[in-house]
Amino acid sequence: MANTADSNVTKTVGKLLAVVVGMFAFVFVVMVPLYDVLCEQLGLNGKTGGRYEYVEAGVDSSREIKVQFVASNNEGMPWEFRPTVTMIKVNPGAATDTVFYAKNPQPENMVAQAVPSISPSRAAEYFHKTECFCFNQQPLAGGEETEMALQFIVDQDLPADIKTITLSYTLFDVTDRVDSDAVVSR
Amino acid sequence: MAHGPAKGLSRWLLTTNHKDIGTLYLWFSFTMFLLGGFFAMIIRAELFQPGLQLVEPEFFNQMTTMHGLVMVFGAIMPSFVGLANWMIPMMIGAPDMALPRMNNWSFWILPPTFLMLASTLFMEGGAPNFGWTFYAPLSTTYAPSTVTYFIFGVHLMGLSSIMGSINIIATVVNMRAPGMTYMKMPMFVWTWLITAFLLVAVMPVLAGLVTMMLMDVHFGTSFFSAAGGGDPVLFQHIFWFFGHPEVYIIILPGFGVVSQIIPTFSRKPLFGYDSMVYATASIAFLSFIVWAHHMYTVGMPIAGELFFMYATMLIAVPTGVKVFNWITTMWRGSLTFETPMLFAIGFVFLFTIGGFTGVMLALAPADFQYHDSYFVVAHFHYVMVAGAVFSMTAAVYYWLPKWTGKMYNESMGKAQFWVSFVGFNLTFFPQHFVGLAGMPRRIPDYALQFTDFNMMSSIGAFIYGASQLFFLFNVIRTIIAGEPVNRDKVWEGAEGLEWTVSSPPPYHTFTTPPPVK
Ligand code: HEM
Ligand SMILES: [Cu+2]
């Protein structure tokens, strides 16, 4: 009698421990990846996808979309950072190039990472970047300046009511996360 | 098996007796309640007038954070675990908890944990200052160095809660006396069983969350940092996936207590027992799909706003079922208003107000205005103080004569109720108004037009705080010099196995299972 009660308790505890371990793992292996996938699929947070493989699909010259560029520094980031043109009118389907200007005014070498965001967020899935400085970290030696390339295509399927898309970049200082000397001297 | 308790300090350090451990939990949580209350007094003293008079803004932030953490994790949660330890074995006719040794551990983890958390106040950098919700990046990139202690502390508290709830589930599932079917269990046991499942499900999520923080802070990952490809909004999703079930973890045992007390003093069985069980279970289930009502303003798509809005409003339905059942239980009962009953009725009344403001906050378009204002503060204090704390106070008055075999002073109890009731409402009712008028939460200073209401709040808070010392006095007086009750069934209308044993109960109860009708 006492023994069966004990073994029942052990069984219950075993099951509950499995739930505990399962829920702990759930956070890492389900919630985090699921969040990223959902955000990307739905364009939430204006998150844009990674590199886009160009497919020849013709240019829709019947309409023009205004694409505006915004650049800002995250708190404490000392770089000069701005788009060289602030607005371009493009036809959906046409690949367009532009550059952003960045300068490291500090004496030290630094590494930056730009994080893009699109608004309205509904437009995110129709905005394709075939080339972007945000795909890589940008190292700059002290005092160095550079122009950083962006090539994008607005999808022909962009909903008709979206006439203006704003692409904004926030520049983060990631020097501490990488070995900046190694990156700059590369 | 030993017959009586061991002597001296080792009795408490080494005890595996559910009553001893219950007592330890109750005293510990009351100590934490006073500590958290002390922090609240500092907050209210600073907010008595506009401008900065008593404390630095940085310290003020530490106070709001520590107040929230200590009250939620140190006072309310352990107090109900203590109650569960004392009452569940006696209510289901079990000799003890299923895992007595683990029980000892889950208690003794807590005092060092909170000592460590409190000691951060005296460390360089100060205590955690990022709010009890510890949103990243405040708690990662901008955190004080003591954040590591905080993370470790949360891990330990989580461990304690998980062990405690596994123990409760194992006890209820396996140790009920023959004949005590699930649908005969007292409501308090039911609500705790469901609470324990919630705890087992979401405490690991909290642990995972603080583990991610730890990795972001010390090991260079970027779960919550946009610079490295992470996202601070992810933090909020995970936090509230834990956080909303957590608020039900706090309130469900209170529902159980009130469901015991109201029938006793109405001298009628609980109305709609079955529906109470199902309502509790549905509240627990729904609590997993409403978390983003705390995040309406982060920029969710409209479909998300609508989903979380309707799901949240849906919770009001089973909650309403419970409220109506309590009221119907009282309907045409032969009511008497002893102190536990006063607190229970106060609970029903004030919790319902908190439920209403909850539904107001659940409306996504309106919440853009209310979010992070004092209106939210008023809402959650109506449900947590007038909900959880009032029900806990009711429970102490209700079972104290059983635990000690002595009667508390009824007039003092009633006086404490009325002083608490007035103090509580004076503190928190005006906060609805300043909140609607735009006063943000968690700030040490405010615009002049909010002065009068804030003064009222502060005075109310001092009154409410004083009434807790009065409560402590009454309890200690009872233990030392209360009138012996000399009967098993302390309250004539009470039902249940705990009233079939003597008052105070012997150290070991139900070593042979009692007959269950
Ligand atoms: C009908 C039931 C309820 C509804 C509809 C509801 C709804 C809400 C909503 C929408 C918010 C977010 C407000 C904002 O930040 O803008 C909120 C906040 C909160 N609620 Fe409730 N609630 C309910 C019951 C409860 C209960 C029973 C508790 C706990 C015992 C509780 C505790 C809290 C807490 C602690 C917060 C604030 C969290 C924070 O930001 O610090 N609520 N509630
Ligand atoms: Cu919630």
Image: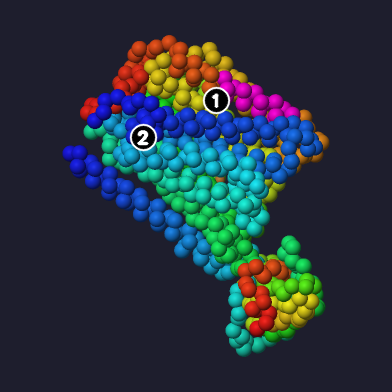
Q: Residue at x 58, y 65 (%)?
A: B220
User: Which amino acid is tagged 1?
Assistant: Gly
Residue B84, by quadrant, is top left
Return the residue at label 2.
B14
Q: Which residue is mark 1?
A: B346
* Three-letter residue code for mark 2: Leu
- Specify start and end residues of the magenta stretch as a single range: B453-470
The answer to whether marks 1 and 2 mark residues whose Cβ atoms lie closer than 8 Å is no
Q: Residue at x 53, y 19 (%)?
A: B473
Quadrant in the picture for residue B69: top right
Q: Tell me the subunit letter for badge 1.
A: B
Q: What secondary structure characterizes most of the magenta part?
A: helix
Q: Residues within 10 Å of mark 1 (few under 14, many from 20)?
A: many
Q: From the viewer's perspective, is A63 left or right of B515?
A: right
What is the CA distance from the residue labelled 1 to the residue labelled 2? 38 Å
Quick one: quadrant of the C terminus of chain B? top left
- Can residue B267 be seen here? no
Task: Report whether the residue tagged 2 is closer than 8 Å to ligand 1.
Answer: no
Q: Chain of mark 2?
A: B
Rendering quarter of residue A59 = bottom right
Q: Is residue B420 left or right of residue B81?
A: right
Ligand 2 shown in quarter: top right
Residue B59 x/y as whole percent: 69, 42
Please tell me which residue is depicted at 24% across the width and 43% down the height of the picture. A6
Q: Position of residue B173 (x, y in %)?
A: 30, 41
Left or right relative to A180: residue A13: left
Q: Residue furthest left?
A: A1
- Earlier-in-chain disc, 1 versus 2: 2
Rendering coords of residue A89 (x, y %)? 77, 79
